[in-house]
Amino acid sequence: MTGYLREPLLHFILIGAALFFIYSLTSDSTADDQNRIVIGEADVDRIISLWEMKWKRLPTETELQGLIEAHIREEVLYREALSMGLDKDDTIVRRRMAQKVEFISDNIAEQAEPSDEQLSAYLDANREKFEIPAEVSFRHVYLNVDQRGAAIEQDAERLMNQLGDGDGGDIENMGDPFMFGNRHDTLTRAGVARLFGSEFMEQLFSQQPGQWQGPLVSGYGLHLVHIESLIGASQPSLDSVRDRVRQEWSADERKRFNESFYEQLRSHYEVVIEPYPAQQLGKTAISVAGEG
Amino acid sequence: MKKATITLTLCVSATLASAQTALSPAKEDIPEAQKVYSPYVERTLRDKNFAEGLYWGDTHLHTRYSTDSGMIGNKLGPDEAYRFARGEQVISSTGQPAKLIRPLDFLVVSDHAEALGLAPFIAEGNPDLLATENGKRWYDMVNAGEGYEAFREWGAYMFKGADPINSPTMQRTVWERQIEAADRNNEPGVFTALIGYEWTSLNTEQVPSNLHRVIIFKDDADKASEVIPFSAYDSIDPEDLWAWMQRYEDETGGRVLAIPHNGNLSNGLMFATERLNGKPLTKEYAETRMKWEPLYEVTQIKGDGEAHPKLSTTDEFADYGTWDKGDIAGVKPKTDDMLPHEYARSALQLGLQQEQKLGANPFKFGMIGSSDSHTALASTRDENYWGKFAGTEPAKDRYEHYVIKAFSGDESLSTFAWEEVASGLAAVWARENTRDGIFEGMQKKETYATTGTRITVRFFGGWDYAADEVYRPDAVQIGYDRGVPMGGDLPAAPKDKKAPVFMVGALKDPWSGNLDRIQIVKGWLDEKGNMQERIYDVACADRKITKDKQCDGPVGNTVDEKNATYLNNIGDAELRAVWADPDFDAKHRAVYYARVLEIPTPTWQAYDAKFYGIEMPEQVPLSHQERAYTSPIWYTPAGK
């Protein structure tokens, strides 16, 4: 049943029929009325509300007269244009009409209100998009390879022994000074990679918390690290990310709907592309006169 | 909202501070920290307004909303620009997948105000655009396959001083889209999207220049939407732009600043010593300019503007990304007398001279770098260079394409893609990664420029930093407590101090070349009020400093140009120094900034040659030294 309701073409046909029906009710035009323009109460209401939207106040009587005149003028010219066939072969009119159909399609897509089941399923299918990223808090003792040279590995071992099983105590004065300090709190993978590079980040996230380990290698040298806490990535509950999930779901759904809608419309046409002579395609050199 | 806080060394935690060793700070050096019972409370220096976070961004990026981008092939809009900057993979205009090495922390999408949104509005057949004569004409041309010709017609209007579209409705619609995109992509603490645009004055066809400024808002859409961008069609004179900025602040209570760029293409007008209206500079002009323009974009794809080899004849690194053929449109050739008014180093000295004369310094700017890319892709690394325009995205022959096709028809004023530098980035020291934090960092000039890599640099000036203090764990705290950070003014000299002392530290980009050296560039006025400059090497990797204050020989070169590779077996990961000015004269105004150089690495042209299996012409540089330029610290004699 729901699949049936989500059928784009059916929606379109129903909406088309509805639009036609409404139009036939509101415009009681017959062949005799072709040269008759009636400005009804509904028209005036619409004119007033358009004005109000733009100017944030109601039009005066004089302004309204002017607006109605402008509306009549547009109607007269529009009907003349139609009878002269000016709507044919005009790129702007064609594009505008095509756009209107796209708007209808967009509107239908927007109507869709997802159920909790749909959102949960979407959340499950797109775990990496919504996950709460892993976070690490750690301290480290830095060894500068330029200053220590070949002795660096020996130094690392000596410092490791000194650090032992404890929490390190006064690590600020061990090893070499590091511009960003020895303590880093609640950094995500991206946050660690940003400061130390991605190789170091990968190594760090595979260490055990609660003890001194290393040395790990970064672009700067060696690091002895002590992870204080490592909280893995987790899935949020639907409630905590409902708005975001809904937004993403709607965007995906609209895209899917619009595409299948167009595909269905197109399938009603036989498209023939006649052979065309091979043309030499231009190569535009980029040149910019006075910009940048 | 989660915030990743980089806790700097200076946050001496209460439990750790008790341990005293030789290098630990003496108790009296450290101001009493506010006592907090819970040991787990995040310890920051926010109360003292110290900048503890270093944030990287691009303040100058164009999307298809810029006419010279969207009309010539760029299909990517602001949303794609933000996604790319945040580290997502996107498909470029030429259909190639593109991704950054690591995300940026902030971005300013700064599309040209002049006919903003022309390309997307043509694509949409926007009725407001089609209601205008030129809009309709260019729309028809694009639909007839003459988009490039339409773009050239628009370009010609840049010298006419008139808006060829002149549709306030269109401007309003497109500006609202821009600021909504910025608000939508702004995530406090994680990624900052600042609202901005570019004011694009070329001056006149008779005196062609480049007076461009990127305008940056501190505010959200609610305030920024109360105006539409002031463009070069409104006025070509920056003084009118500043008046508009003043009005914006007065009427909305918002905050805004402007960043000029490409003095190298301004034909002597960027730092001219007379106003655009021909009148002499005044104290009021200097104060107004500095109120609105705290920063200068010193390096970008269209050349590096720190120094020029003809002005700094003994600086072996001055000839880097030098673009000195003429103005930005290639109308008039460059003459030597224009150069001092185009480059940051000479402009800082001119500023001292003007200050002596007027009582206010009109060129007291801090520095940032940015890309000015027109591809919506803020990429500044040589091995990941996406070019200046969609037409010069990675391709075998891109290096030989035009970037500036001389408007005058004189080919000697044209510039080609191979002359581009894959530069630069803006580094901002700030309290936090938010619109407030980044904007305030910019206003304080606690910023620096790099040519595209992420070298970390701290720079402090004061009167009594001891030689070993730069190695102490609380060096940054000492830096702030006893002096000023980059962008500041030296405090008055204590009676017993003979010369200012600078504390500087640099850490390499973990994904780039090691460091070669740190230099301090000094500019000053001599006895006669003439401009002087000197460069002191203050920290050298693998070498000693000679008595001429230079590194003892070059750092070496490990670049294999043919394979576009290099080895990090020379240079240092980190350099630090404390340096007292040996030639200081308390009577004379002076300005100091730090320049940090990496070891040589391959250029984007070398990576291109390797990737596409081609030979570059001989004049194309295949290796270079990436660098950072800090905002200066100024010295003003007492009572002046």
Image (tube, coloured by chain):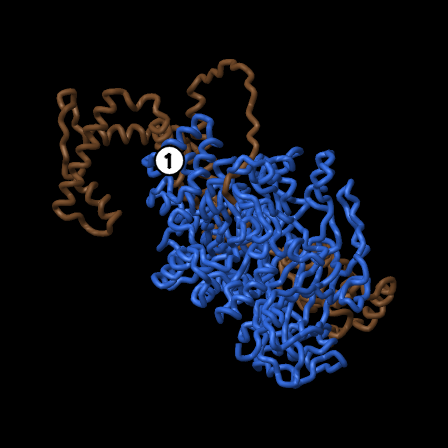
Chain colours: A brown, B blue
Q: Nearer the viewer, residue B492 or A113?
A: B492
Q: Position of residue A47 (x, y in %)?
A: 20, 41
Q: Position of residue B295 (x, y in %)?
A: 53, 60
Task: Determine the residue positioned at 44% across, 25% down.
Answer: B144
Q: Is residue A226 visible from the viewing direction of this image?
A: no
Residue labelled with disc 1: B135
Q: Nearer the viewer, residue B230 or B127?
A: B230
Farthest-out residue, front = B528
Compared across the picture, whether A268 is left or right of B330 comes to left
Helix, strand or loop at mark 1 = helix
Task: Determine the residue positioned at 81% across, 54% down.
Answer: B556
Q: Nearer the viewer, residue B188 or B132?
A: B132
Task: Determine the residue positioned at 43% across, 37% down.
Answer: B154
Chain letter, disc 1 residue: B
Q: Position of residue A109 (x, y in %)?
A: 40, 38
Which quadrant would residue B430 be assigned to in this image? bottom right
- Is A201 above or below relative to A102? below
* Mark 1 residue type: Gly
Task: Determine the residue positioned at 16% across, 45% down.
Answer: A63
Q: Is residue B555 visible from the viewing direction of this image?
A: yes
Compared across the picture, whether A146 is left or right of A46 comes to right
Disc 1 packing (10 Å; few <14; some 14–19; many ≥20):
many
- Is B614 above or below relative to A157? above
Count of numbered circles on the image: 1
Q: Position of residue A25 (x, y in %)?
A: 19, 30
- Is B327 above or below relative to B282? above
